[in-house]
Amino acid sequence: MKKPLIFAIETLVVVGLTFLGWLLPLISLPILRIFANIGTNLLLGASAWVAIKLSGLSVDFEWKNYKQFLIGAGVCLVLSLCIAWIPALCGCSLVGAHQTFVLWKLFFNLFYFLLIIGPVEELIFRVYYQKTLVAFFGARKWIGVILASALFGLWHLINGSWIQVAFTFGIGLAFGFTKEYVKDMHYPGISLCHGLYDFLNYVVTITI
């Protein structure tokens, strides 16, 4: 199967599964809604994995390089301070309204963001889309990083707004350029960075 066709099909699958997420609030039982949400995200990750394999790409599962986790945590903290913590402390939250603290939600979100959202979204956007676009542009691989980040931003338009698109485009650029140009950064490190960033944003909403 030709790569442009794989690219188009994967994009349709990602958009379709994301729109399917609109139906989740219709599930009355909270526990079923949680499992359906996790299942939808796992399907997104599985579709990206299939696209990666059909395109002849590889996933850099380099777990033993511990520098990537320190780099990922550092990038995450800078982003979270600039986008979440400082604005919230100044009375202008950019990551959502205040939420009531619930202990089980704290632990669930730690699991959800670090083990589901971070790995799945990075597999889609920084592994499949970014690698595909970087390979297409060759020596001008920075264009591929920007376009993959733009797709990451536009994807959030389905469940968000143009303001969210702009923010996630900027965040995608930070993740994308870190993944592409930092020698010690691999898929596990950028997944940690993404998941931890989302979790810290949640922590802001329950503390400030």
Image (cartoon, rainbow, N blue to C red):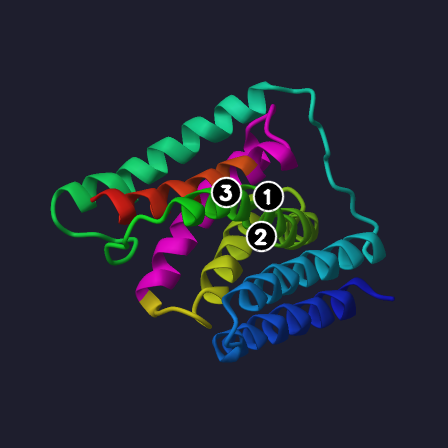
Crowding near pointer 2: few (<14 within 10 Å), some, many (20+)?
many
Front residue of 27/154: it is 27
Q: Which image quadrant is residue 99 in?
A: bottom left
Left/right of residue 194 with respect to residue 126 in the rendered view: left
Q: Amino acid at mark 1?
A: Leu
x, y percentage for residue 148? 55, 55
Quarter of the image with the C terminus in it: top left
Q: Earlier in the sequence, mark 2 or mark 3?
A: 2
Q: Earlier in the sequence, mark 2 or mark 1?
A: 1
Q: Check if mark 3's residue and mark 1's residue have beta carbons within 8 Å.
A: yes
Q: Earlier in the sequence, mark 3 or mark 1?
A: 1
Count every numbered label the image shows and give the total.
3
x, y percentage for residue 34? 55, 62
| Label 2 vs label 1, nearer the camera | 1
Residue 26 marker? none
Where is mark 1, residue-wise?
115
Q: Is residue 189 magenta?
A: yes
Residue at mark 2 to residue at mark 3: CA–CA distance? 9 Å
Q: Amino acid at mark 2?
A: Glu
Q: Give the magenta part as a residue range.
A: 163-191
Where is mark 2, residue-wise?
121
Q: Is residue 174 magenta?
A: yes
Where is mark 3, residue-wise?
195
x, y percentage for residue 26? 50, 80
Report the magenta stretch's main SS: helix
Quarter of the image with the N terminus in it: bottom right
